[in-house]
Amino acid sequence: TGTFNATLQVRTTTGCTSPVFSFPVTVHPNPVPSFNMSNACLPDGVVNFTSTSTIADGSQTGFIYNWNFGNPASGTLNTATIRDPSHRYSSTGPFTIKLIVTSNNGCIDSISRVQNNIFPQPRAGLTAPAEVCWQTPVTFRDNSNGITHPVTRWEWRFENASGTVVHTSTQRDPVFNFATPGTYTVRHWVFTNQNCVSDTAVFNIVINPWPT
């Protein structure tokens, strides 16, 4: 890269020569495309892209960006022209993302990377007796499935018939003794080590009163 002086002189077959024509030629550097991208969890599926593209003359503020997210099913949302876009995927892929960078002098280069870190949604599950007698401690056992990654966090919420939360827990297999007879709703969801959150499992349990 740099500015160079080009010269041209024409000679005929009879030996006549023209004056020497001289003109400067500037060779600009090519951009160096590069980007980072986040992981994503379904069903949200949003991947954030961050351009780290550079150029030797430091003129990257003048870059023009053209992204293709490798997801033609998303229609017009499959492309973007901003520096740091986001894109929502509805499946795990993999997807090939291409970034084309054009410098302010019209020099062009591109890079492609594969996104294969879009994780499926975990599935929450639990087992417990459908009904017990009052003042019987109840064990709720988690049987959730992280699908591709281990479950590392558990959330439980216990509600009475009016929807009031009477207890919460972050244990894997909590034990709870309900204070009064009635029908209760238990809601359970989990997170994997990729911080993907599951759906919510809903379970109803009846606490029967003592006979009188």
Image (cartoon, rainbow, N blue to C red):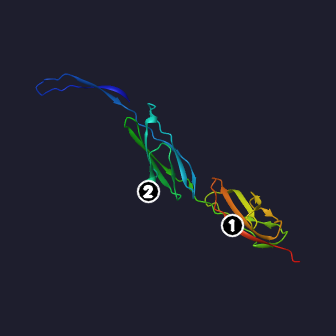
Please tell me which residue is depicted at 43% across the width and 54% down the height of the picture.
76
Report how far apart the C-alphas of labels 1 and 2 lie in the structure: 36 Å
Q: Residue furthest front?
A: 162
x, y percent for residue 1:
38, 30
x, y percent for residue 197:
64, 57
Q: Secondary structure at mark 1?
A: strand
Quadrant for residue 30, please give it.
top left
Q: Nearer the viewer, residue 16 or 96?
A: 96
Residue 75 numbered mark, or none? 2
Residue 202 numbered mark, or none? 1
Please tell me which residue is depicted at 47% across the width and 50% down the height of the picture.
97
Q: Is residue 69 left or right of residue 200?
A: left
Q: Residue furthest left?
A: 14
Please tell me which residue is depicted at 48% across the width and 54% down the height of the picture.
95
Q: Is residue 163 left or right of residue 180?
A: left
Callout 1: 10 Å neighbours few (<14), some, many (20+)? some
Q: Is residue 30 left or right of residue 155?
A: left
| Amino acid tagged 2 | Gly
| Amino acid tagged 1 | Val
Tell me which label, 1 or 2, sits earlier in the chain.
Answer: 2
Q: Secondary structure at mark 2?
A: helix
Callout 2: 10 Å neighbours few (<14), some, many (20+)? few
Vertical comparison of 54 with 43: above or below = above
Q: Residue furthest top?
A: 19
